[in-house]
Amino acid sequence: MQKIFLAGIAAAGVLSGSALASDLPIKAPLYKAPIVAPPYNWSGFYVGANFGGAWSNGGLNIPGNNLYGGLSEFIGGVQAGYNFQAGHFLFGVEGEFDGAGFGHPVLPAPTLGFVDQHWIGTVAGRVGLVDDRWLVFAKLGGGWVNSSATLNLPGAAWNGTSTNTGWLAGAGIEYGFKSHWTVKLEYDYLGLSNWSSPTVPSVALNRDLQMVKAGINYKFESGLPAEAEAPKHSREPSEDEDLQKKSQNPIADLVSVPFQSNTNFNAGPFNRPQEVLNIQPVVPMHLNDDWNVISRTIIPVVSQPSPFFDSNTNGIGDITQSLFFSPTNPGKLIWGVGPVFTVPSANDPILGTGRYLFGPTAVLVVTPPHWVIGVLLNNQWSVGGNPLRPPVNAFLAQPFANYNMPHGWYLTSSPVITSNWLAPSGQQWTVPIGGGFGRVFRVGDQPVNASIAGYYNAVRPTGTPAWQLRAELALLFPVK
């Protein structure tokens, strides 16, 4: 009986112990909330610089004056402004001052007239929609343009200068790629009254301007909290290898500013060297978790042999802007597609087409071990600009292959193949062959990519250079 009683107590203790254990609070696993990047702050004062192209619809309306009948030019200058952000809305004011450059080559015969524009100033209010680092804005205000004109008509020589005002309307996009830095791309229309010469007969000067400008701004107030912009001091060797491949990928998540020198030997009728220095800032912009937009701008600084004299014409050529939409997780094949357009920004007719160009562009890239292989493609057609200049239909293909070696060294080949579809048969294609070498290294904490290569134009139009030397120095800014 006693044994049964003790067994019952033991059983009761076991059961009660189990019941008490089930009632004890269980320590839940720690929950870690996902780290959400703070939204970008657009408020505050800023200053910056801009560059681009401008063109008028008419210029001097003189029949047969095809070089100077319309006006296209390089513009560049500074801007300053203030933004006030209220949630997803932005209100602000911005002032810009740009110098305008339009040169006139010496011609064998006198021209009937030409136009110069010296400077453009604007003040406008801005209103926009903000989505974190992205800003889409419109602007409305006024502007001033200082112009001069010269006429050499039979019996009617005249020269005059005037500053006139007009209204300004525009729109654009801006992206905050660093805590204190933003980049923008905008289109502006400046409506001005016509200016008529006091000659008989009178000649009308149409000074309405269309402008496409890219710019960069420095914000005095940081767009991110201090803890979000703390620098990363340590790095692994694999990061340098990754940087080496990213620097060779046109649509990588990497901010870079390449300076590419292209020297073409024995160009023109006097066998003079042609020099084209391309300044090519590349800025990746994050649309969302799935898509990036990569902005690639080409600003050519050109020294062009004259077709008439044993001399060179120097200045800015037509600026090209590409936008590549690319998935953030593309798989083995990295790709990007989007629009490309060229603005008639040349400050001399010899240095540009005088036309606004537009078309599609695409990039395909694969990165097997030690390699970065791909191709960049685009085709552009003339869709505006000076109607008296010849139309344009131009194709470009740039295949590239890079073999990466230890210590940042690599072998490279990246010929630029072009076709002018409107040229006569046999004069359309330029096909270079060649290559070179380069290295990705650091100067202090600043990553740099340097390379040099030579190319022979195996297929080329009559009278064009046979050899090209290309040297490039790129400053790299990895996205943290």
Image (cartoon, rainbow, N blue to C red):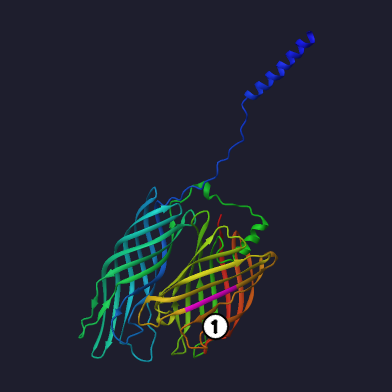
In the rendered image, residue 397 lying in the magenta stretch gets the answer: yes
Residue furthest out toward the top: 1
Whether residue 324 sits left or right of residue 212 in the image: it is: right
Q: Amino acid at mark 1?
A: Thr
Whether residue 459 sits left or right of residue 340 in the image: it is: right
Q: Residue at x 42, y 82 (%)?
A: 350
Q: Which residues are magenta?
A: 394-399
Q: Is residue 469 above or below residue 84?
A: below
Whether residue 164 sits left or right of residue 322 in the image: it is: left
Q: Nearer the viewer, residue 370 or 75?
A: 370
In which image quadrant can residue 167 be found?
bottom left
The prevailing secondary structure element of the residues shown in magenta is strand
Counting labels gives 1
Q: Which residue is mark 1?
A: 430
Residue 449 percent across, percent down from the top left: 60, 67
Residue 21 percent across, percent down from the top left: 66, 23
Q: Is residue 43 above or below residue 337?
A: above
Residue 72 percent across, percent down from the top left: 37, 76
Look at the image and tell me in which quarter the N terminus lies: top right
In the rendered image, residue 343 lying in the magenta stretch gets the answer: no
Q: Residues within 10 Å of mark 1 (few under 14, many from 20)?
A: some
Helix, strand, or loop for circle 1?
strand
Look at the image and tell me in which quarter the C terminus lies: bottom right
Residue 168 percent across, percent down from the top left: 30, 65
In which image quadrant can residue 351 be found?
bottom left
Q: Residue at x 38, y 80 (%)?
A: 103
Q: Is residue 216 above or below residue 11?
A: below
